[in-house]
Each structure stands twice: as C-alpha cells, then as structure tokens.
C-alpha cells in the first residue's frame, strides 16, 4: 500500500479527485490535509468517509511541525498539492492570506518532502525513489490574452491579481526545487473548473442560486470576459495521468478548448433552468441578469493550449460542455432545493 498526501482535499477539485482516485486504485492510501477554511467542507467527502484507505488530518500546510509529523507517521510517498486560497475578489480585499498560504505553504511542503525523500541534491533515498510532488496551478499565472491566441507551457508569467501572483510565485518555487535539488516535480496549470461541490461564491453556483431565489444574477462589467471551462472530473483524470506518467520537471496545461463569455454562461444556465425548473411567473431567468461594476484588474480572456498533454500523454476531455453543464445545474438544484 502506497500512501500519498493530498492537500486541500475538502475543497472543490480536491474532494472530487479523492473520490475518483480511491475508486480507481485499490493500492493507494490517501491522507487528506485540509485547514477547513470557509472553502473546505467535509461534507464534500461523505462518500469516502468510511473508506479504510482514507485518513483526514485537519491542519495548515504552513505548519511545518505538522507536515513533518504526517510524513513520518504515514510514510508519505507522493504529494498532490491542491490547497490554495483561490478567489480573486478575496485576494484583492486581503492579499496577505494568499501570500502566506499559496507561497509559504507550498514552500513548507516542498522542503519537508525534499528532506524526507532525499539524502542530498539529486540523490533520492533508496526507498523513496520515484516519489513525486504534483503542484496544481492555474491558467491565471499567464495573465490576460487579447481576442486571439493561446497560452502554452512556454508563455511568460504575467499575473495580474494578488491571487495569480501568489500562484505564479508558488510555481517558481516548485520549479526551483527540481532545478536546484532534483526533486521529482510536475506542475499542471488548468483552466476554469466547473461541476459539483464548487464553493457558492464562484460564478456558476452564484448564477444558479440567485436565479432560483429570484434575485439579480450579477455579471461583472459588460459580460464579455472569456474563460476556458473544464469539467472537474475531466480535470481529475488529467491530474491522475500527469501524476503517474508526466515527465519530471515538466509543466502541463489542461484545457477542454471550451471558451465561453461570462454572459453566455449565464444565458445557457438560464435556458437550462427554464426547462427543468421554470419560474412561477413563466418568464425566463434571463430577465434576472444584471450587469454590475467590474472588479479591479479583471483579466479579459484566458485560453490555454492543451496540445502537450494531448500529444504526449493522450489525454482528452470526455464531457461536452452542454451535457456537463446540465449535470452541474441539476446537482446544484438538488443542493439548494434540498431534494
């Protein structure tokens, strides 16, 4: 039995990944380290709660003593690092939390892993050969695009918010541990995720929640901001593939090649709701869409090229946007309506 540490596993992507991973593999044990901030919810993990190969530890990735204890107690032989402060609006209001968690926390995990797994730079301890640190990052580190073009793994980092700057900094520290110490690392930069268990503050849950409560559906600015949307389970399968088969020291961009304007996302969700949960007044939910003041430093467009993971590892998304979006809407309806 091989034990890996998953950080931030009570959050949106992490909880989906843990359930997927434990169901797929019988020879892994998962230790989930999560601080349970407002964005972490143990209810996201009810499906794996009784699994004998799953262990939850509540704590902070910045707590070096705790991280060292976890490595020793469970003999950790791999890390998939999801834990991060991730909401851009919150990073604008309180950037210090993002600097501490996303930068200092990542450093703590890296340094403990290096000292536990390796004798010295470029020399793994025999029993830990092949142990890998997989860092989960974001397309936002690349900054904003114009109307055309795509970010690749070779694109320069140009973060525009305290959140994306903190993630870019963490990426650089992860890379440095590969170049300086020979630590076996991989980095994945993903586009916007959607699906079950996402925090209510995010765009798609907000649209659904406000709509069914007959409240204005807030859309920043003119609604023309473009994001590249990736279904969370497709992302989990890509992470699994990179963790097991990705080349050490490499970055892999993960995207479904699915660009959508924010206003179009809102309209599509409204159309789905019109069909499956119509308003009592028979009007379309589209009428609830309201444009609000844009947030500072709001990137205009993100789009990343997933050719590398497609061509070298054979990954392709399995879901279409329309089918996965309807699944997502139905999941949140069940959550918010309680049936």
Image (cartoon, rainbow, N blue to C red):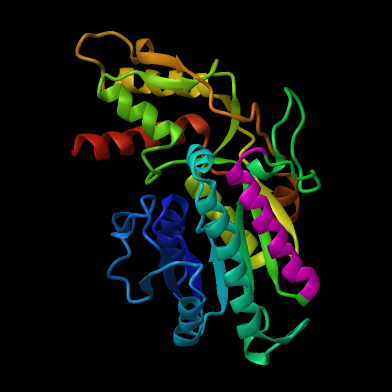
Q: Residue 268, how many percent across, how many down?
A: 45, 21
Total numbered labels placed on residues in the image: 0
Q: Residue 196, how many percent across, how many down?
A: 38, 44
- Inspect this view and state whether residue 195 appears: yes
- Inspect this view and state whether residue 246 appears: no
Q: Residue at x 38, y 27 (%)?
A: 207
Q: Report the side of 143 relative to 215 (left or right).
A: right
Q: Report the side of 238 relative to 312 (left or right).
A: left
As displayed, is residue 322 above or below residue 117?
Answer: above
As displayed, is residue 67 above or below residue 304?
Answer: below
**Residue 162 on the magenta segment:** yes
Q: Report the side of 214 relative to 321 (left or right).
A: left
Q: Main secondary structure of the magenta part?
A: helix
**Which of the 4 quarters of the picture holds residue 57?**
bottom left
Q: Residue at x 54, y 46 (%)?
A: 95
Q: Residue at x 44, y 18 (%)?
A: 267
Q: Residue 102, how many percent across, how many down?
A: 56, 57
Q: Residue at x 54, y 18 (%)?
A: 221
Q: Residue 240, how many percent across, how many down?
A: 57, 61
**Residue 44 on the magenta segment:** no
**Residue range corresponding to the magenta coloring:** 160-180
Quadrant where the C terminus is found in the figure: top left
């Amino acid at each position: 039995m091989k034990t890996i540490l998953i950080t931030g596993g009570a959050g949106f992507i992490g909880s989906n990944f843990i359930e997927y991973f434990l169901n797929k593999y019988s020879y892994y044990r998962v230790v989930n380290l999560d601080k349970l901030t407002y964005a972490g919810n143990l209810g996201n993990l009810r499906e794996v709660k009784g699994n004998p190969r799953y262990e939850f530890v509540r704590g902070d990735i910045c707590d070096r003593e705790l991280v060292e204890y976890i490595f020793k107690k469970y003999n950790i032989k791999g890390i998939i690092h999801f834990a991060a402060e991730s909401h851009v609006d919150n990073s604008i209001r309180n950037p210090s939390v993002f600097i501490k968690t996303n930068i200092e926390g990542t450093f703590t995990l890296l340094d403990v892993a290096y000292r536990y797994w390796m004798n010295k730079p470029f020399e793994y301890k025999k029993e830990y050969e092949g142990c890998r640190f997989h860092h989960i990052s974001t397309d936002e580190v690349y900054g904003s695009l114009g109307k055309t073009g795509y970010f690749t793994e070779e694109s320069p980092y140009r973060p525009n918010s305290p959140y994306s700057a903190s993630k870019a900094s963490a990426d650089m520290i992860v890379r440095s541990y590969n170049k300086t110490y020979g630590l076996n690392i991989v980095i994945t930069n993903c586009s916007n995720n959607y699906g079950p268990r996402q925090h209510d503050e995010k765009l798609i849950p907000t649209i659904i929640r406000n709509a069914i409560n007959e409240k204005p559906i807030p859309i920043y600015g003119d609604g023309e901001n473009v994001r590249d949307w990736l279904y969370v389970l497709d992302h989990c399968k890509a992470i699994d593939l990179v963790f097991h088969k990705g080349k050490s020291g490499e970055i892999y961009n993960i995207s479904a090649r699915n660009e959508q304007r924010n206003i179009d996302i809102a309209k599509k969700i409204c159309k789905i709701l019109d069909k499956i949960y119509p308003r009592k007044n028979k009007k379309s939910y589209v009428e609830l869409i309201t444009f609000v003041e844009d947030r500072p430093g709001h990137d205009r467009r993100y789009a990343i090229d997933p050719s590398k993971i497609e061509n070298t590892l054979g990954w392709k998304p399995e879901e279409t946007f329309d089918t996965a979006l309807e699944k997502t809407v139905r999941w949140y309806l069940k959550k918010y309506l309680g049936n």
